[in-house]
Image (tube, helix red, strand yellow):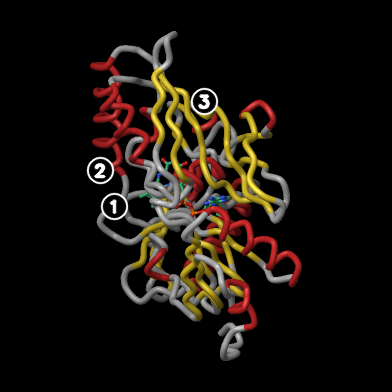
Amino acid sequence: MIAPSTPPASTGLVTGLAADASPGESLAPWTSLRVGGPAELLVRPRTAGALVSILARASAGGVPVHVLGGGANTLVGDLGIPGVTLKLPADLFAEEVQPLDSGGGLVTLGAGAAIVRLTNLMRARGWVGAEFLAGIPGTIGGAVAMNAGTKHGECERVLEAVELATPDGLGWVPRSALRIRYRFTELPRGAIITRARFRLLDGDLEASRAAMEADLGYRKRTQPLSQPNCGSVFQNPPGDHAGRLIDSVGLKGATLGGAQISTLHANWIVNLGGARAADAVGLIERAQERVREATGVMLVPEVKRVGVFA
Ligand SMILES: Cc1cc2nc3c(=O)[nH]c(=O)nc-3n(C[C@H](O)[C@H](O)[C@H](O)COP(=O)(O)OP(=O)(O)OC[C@H]3O[C@@H](n4cnc5c(N)ncnc54)[C@H](O)[C@@H]3O)c2cc1C
């Protein structure tokens, strides 16, 4: 357990700032796998200025900062996250929609907004381009940080610019200045995404709608969406699928404590009830070991492990 100093060392970080702070709040409900211990201090800034001040104070005080989006790709350790865990409210920034004379438009969303806001606004405006994000849970900040997507496209395809917060303030960075690759966007050390701007296009609305419906149908058929999960656990190795490899070594359905390698999709771990982060980690390591022994492939986790594990 994170040493329950009362009040926690980090509480002073938010004194006098427009921010809500909750010491020792359990993070399990804030992740899609529903496991993990408490945040030493969970902070929800109410203004961008407060966010920058928190980052500055944390930096000066050597307090670690983690930003949690929708927790749809995060495995929080059973002993929790030390320091400050930031959660950016969905309404911290107003949505901006700017049609362009050349066709299509720019949509700017706060990092704490749900990914589905982008596809909803796209459809409402009659634009296309971000179909591949349909059905991906989480926030805009998480989607950019993870370069979320599918084989049909990744976030970077529609990303125009991001606004970053650092201890020094806020600033926009164009997409061209960011290094982005498969499931990873490199951010300056300590920087947090506060807003992202996307470029959407005029196009074939019927094809766009059909693509999203097909993706959602595929997800319902192939993914264990009725059980708490964290999406794909491993990145797909080049030219192969992590799920196929895990299935091939007989681990589909393997359980450890309350966690199970899904019987529906072997690259997913589900929480059968009462799972601990240690159970999920045990299954992750077992899958890595068995696949490496059998095939020589070392599976690389896609899910982010954060905080203190036993
Ligand atoms: C049912 C299900 C289906 C999924 N399907 C897909 C899929 O098809 N494709 C895919 O790519 N992913 C998929 N995922 C994984 C997940 O939805 C994506 O990775 C998503 O982008 C995570 O967003 P999040 O806000 O939940 O991120 P979190 O899990 O909260 O965080 C993920 C990482 O992003 C960082 N981060 C979050 N917000 C910020 C910010 N504001 N600034 C800087 N860093 C930040 C975190 O620190 C962490 O390192 C799926 C997950 C589930 C549960």
Picture coordinates of residue 27, whole percent (x, y) = 45, 71
**Cβ(mark 1) to ligand 1 < 8 Å?**
yes
The residue nearer to you, when weighing 97 against 247, is 97
The crowding category of the residue bearing disc 3, from other C-alpha atoms within 10 Å (few below 14, some 14 to 19, many at least 20), is: some
Task: Kindly identify which residue carries mark 2.
Answer: 220
Of mark 2 and mark 3, the one earlier in the sequence is: 3
Picture coordinates of residue 156, whole percent (x, y) = 54, 30
Q: Secondary structure at mark 1?
A: loop
Spatial CA span between label 3 and label 1: 26 Å
Spatial CA span between label 2 and label 3: 25 Å
Of mark 2 and mark 1, the one earlier in the sequence is: 2
Tell me the quadrant of the picture where the N terminus can be found. Answer: bottom right
Q: Secondary structure at mark 2?
A: helix
Looking at the image, which residue is at 56% across and 44% down? 145
Looking at the image, which residue is at 67% across and 42% down? 186
Is 137 above or below relative to 5?
A: above
Q: Nearer the viewer, mark 3 or mark 1?
A: 3
Q: Amino acid at mark 2?
A: Lys
